Image (tube, helix red, strand yellow):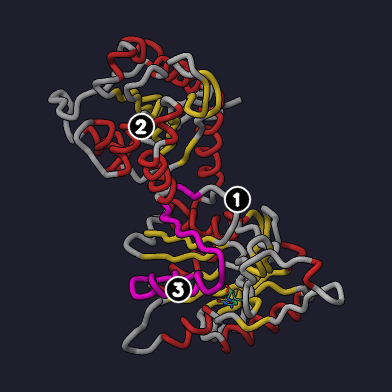
Amino acid sequence: MEAPLAGKTVVLAVTGGIAAYKAVEVARLLKKLGARVLPVLTKNATKFVGPVTFSGITGEAVREDLWDAGVSGELHVLLAAEADLIAVVPATADSMARMASGRCDDLVTATLLCTQSPVLVAPAMHPQMWRHPATEHNTNLLRDRGTLFVGPVDGPVASGESGLGRMAEPSEIVSAIQRHIQARQALPASADQRDLLGKHVVVTAGPTHEPIDPVRFLGNLSSGKMGFAIAEAAARRGATVTLIAGPVHLATPAGVRRRDIVTARELHDAVFAERDTTDVLIMAAAVADFRPREAATQKIKKSDQDDGAPVLELVRNPDILTSVGASRTADQPRPTMLVGFALETGDDASVIAYARDKVRRKKCDLIVANRADQSLGKDDNRVFLVADRRDEVPIVSGPKSLVSSRILDIVVAALS
Ligand code: C5P
């Protein structure tokens, strides 16, 4: 049987912390899975572990110098292009700060700034450094840009103290690397085309939560999986992707810029803030149609209700898709392509009929219609692709990654 990471290249960027010695084990485990491992060490990393250890384990030249005269071409560009994934193990507080601010004055940071491949970091530092607001800010920035994190974990650190800051175990790090590489590999071949290069694709995903009081809200069962899969597929096809996400528990796909929102009105503002630069807007979010007229500032108590139950007065939320559709004119043709979703509870025929009506009413180019029983919270979906002025309605079913790919095929065809 073929090794799970055969044919895959991992650039292992090692930065200068005591956990650097564990990066040797990460290299060994990756090799065992069949990956080609290219070690790149910062100058500080070499104070903790000798480069010869890495070359011995990986069988590859260890790179340290941005100015390596022995290489034809620019080393950081070559490494960035060859990587199926770049893993920063360990990632010190300083290296994360340098990544977050876009520094590129050594081979590790220059390679990271240059790559379009997923970047995974395994932070390792004293718990006080991990908790510092500066590190927290840098972590959030990196997450927003799609950097993948594994750890840190709670446990003993080099100083002998214990806390959140210890690097995840090498086996954990390697499992995360394997998972991410294989997830990308699972995407269909057509997603390898970079046919969305230069396009700004904005995807909305997940539910909205409409506050009733400080501890209660009106929401829905959307998991966000469909929108996140579309964002990931669009990024792989070269688009600049902004993912506007409601409250969901999903990791940001690699290379995707993420904006988090809670309510429909926040979603409305976030969509319109991007509109003038948006080429393609895909509204996969399950936006609440109604919200309580007023959110109570204090928790509503049973004892406040004479007859035992409050009556909630609801008002309509803005229909974002309709507003964007209506705002498109010859002078303001943004977004060029407008895609809506329609989640229905009926049978196939009624779902298609609703979608035909919606595509006209909301002035969008495509409605992706799906049935609640076949999509909500699931990893797979079955969708009807109802385009404006087209009788034929293709049906796509399969993993949400595959469905995303087909939606983007239609987007690309329409853009060209
Ligand atoms: O009309 P309906 O809610 O079925 O339309 C669904 C589509 O409209 C989805 O693309 C959803 O994101 C979008 N929508 C919206 N604003 C709302 C409600 C739905 O943009 N208030």
Q: Position of residue 367 (x, y in %)?
A: 58, 76
Crowding at dot 3, Cα within 10 Å, few <14 / some 14-19 / many 20+, comes out as few
| Residue 202, percent from left and from top | 44, 66
Which of disc 2 and disc 3 is earlier in sequence?
Answer: 2
- Specify few, some or many for label 1: CA neighbours under 10 Å numbering under 14, 14-19, or 20 or more: few
- Front-most of residues 32 and 379: 379
Segment colored magenta: 252-281
Identify the residue shown where x is 42% and y is 86%.
327
Residue drawn at x 60%, y 72% is 287
Q: Is residue 36 visible?
A: no
**Residue tagged by mark 2?**
93
Give the residue number, with chain letter if any, for mark 3.
269
The C terminus: image quadrant = bottom left
Residue at 52%, 42% (x, y): give it: 185
**Image coords of residue 289 (percent x, y):** 64, 78
Image quarter in which the N terminus is found: top right
Q: With 8 as the anchor, is 206 left or right in this view?
A: right
Residue 274 in the magenta stretch? The answer is yes
